Image (cartoon, rainbow, N blue to C red):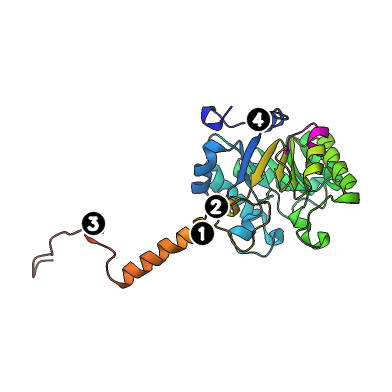
């Protein structure tokens, strides 16, 4: 069912039930207006920790805090009616163990109204995912290239090539067995993504993976051309709004300098007050 025909947003069980069905559509969002624009077109919207890089100019996602995720989560929630909202758990908020993860996931859910949280990691996070799910928190997993581990992965490299493939398959199986309702596969070879999609029981959400995944996600600022610091191969630019915004700002600056803005239609041309009267 398309989002426009839906009366209420899907929940994690609805997303899980889409395994093998019509592809799930998802984008990231960080603000109310952007959430409003995508609401009718997406099954779920991710408040990604990519917010640190694309909105706050950070060099990686490692500096992103719980406070930032809550602030942006609340903003996105105000813009959604038809799509489910998932919020990323930031680096350092869940890796110590299940209790720490529960405390912070519960806070994210309570303070943003999210339907689920997303966390990065496979086999090593299975125990934490199981703990959260058993206590009422829906978890989306994220495996393959996990940007919060950029230092130990040695850069934004494709994961799961050749002998590495078995490890990514084990990660997918572990998070599915632990109760995750879906799993993001980032930057993995197409054949591997297709194999995982056919073998695991939960929907796979691809980003730099395969059109055969159960759904796709992109960072909205990448696909609209607002974030131009770098462009991964897997990003398709559906619009080039960064240059369009700069051209509009240049027009505005030129008109202000020429005193042609504001024009007659932008000002309040009341009569001048009579001389001597207050
Ligand atoms: O933070 C993010 O935007 C993400 C997506 C790339 C899946 O995790």
Residue appearing at x 77%, y 62% in the figure: 155
Q: Which of pointers 3 and 2 indicates the residue nearer the eye?
A: 2
Q: Residues within 10 Å of mark 3 (few under 14, many from 20)?
A: few
| Left/right of residue 151 with respect to residue 227 in the rendered view | right
Decide which of 208, 59 is in the foreground and name it.
Answer: 208
Q: Is residue 136 above or below residue 163?
A: above
Alpha carbons under labels 1 and 3: distance apart = 28 Å
Q: Position of residue 80 (x, y in %)?
A: 53, 39
Q: Is residue 92 visible?
A: no
- Mark 1 and mark 4: span between their CA atoms? 32 Å
Distance (Cα) linking label 3 and label 2: 32 Å
Q: Which mark is residue 265?
A: 3
Q: Can you tell which mark lies on residue 116?
A: none
Judging by the rendered image, the residue that carries numbered circle 1 is 242
Q: Which residue, given by chain and number where applicable, does mark 4 sit on? A: 22
Q: Which residue is mark 2?
A: 224
């Amino acid at each position: 069912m398309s989002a426009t025909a839906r009366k209420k947003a899907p929940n994690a069980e609805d997303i899980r039930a889409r395994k093998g069905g019509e592809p799930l559509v998802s984008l990231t969002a960080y603000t109310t207006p952007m959430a409003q624009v995508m609401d009718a077109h997406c099954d779920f919207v991710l408040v990604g920790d990519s917010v640190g890089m694309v909105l706050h100019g950070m060099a990686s996602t490692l500096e992103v805090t719980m406070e930032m995720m809550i602030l942006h989560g609340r903003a996105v929630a105000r813009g959604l009616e038809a799509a489910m909202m998932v919020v990323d758990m930031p680096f350092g908020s869940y890796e110590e163990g299940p209790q720490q993860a529960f405390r912070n996931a519960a806070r994210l859910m309570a303070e943003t109204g999210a339907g689920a949280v997303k966390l990065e990691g496979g086999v090593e996070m299975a125990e934490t995912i199981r703990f959260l799910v058993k206590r009422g928190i829906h978890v989306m997993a994220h495996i393959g290239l996990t940007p919060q581990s950029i230092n130990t992965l040695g850069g934004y490299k494709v994961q799961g090539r050749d002998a590495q493939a078995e490890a990514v398959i084990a990660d997918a199986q572990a998070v599915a067995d632990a109760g995750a309702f879906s799993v993001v596969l980032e930057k993995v070879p197409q054949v591997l993504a297709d194999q995982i999609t056919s073998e695991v029981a939960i929907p796979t959400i691809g980003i730099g993976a395969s059109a055969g995944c159960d759904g796709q996600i992109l960072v909205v600022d990448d696909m609209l051309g607002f974030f131009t610091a770098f462009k991964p191969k897997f990003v398709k630019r559906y619009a080039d709004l960064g240059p369009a915004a700069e051209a509009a700002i240049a027009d505005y600056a030129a008109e202000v300098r020429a005193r042609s803005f504001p024009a007659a239609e932008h000002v309040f041309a009341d009569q001048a007050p009579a001389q001597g009267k207050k």
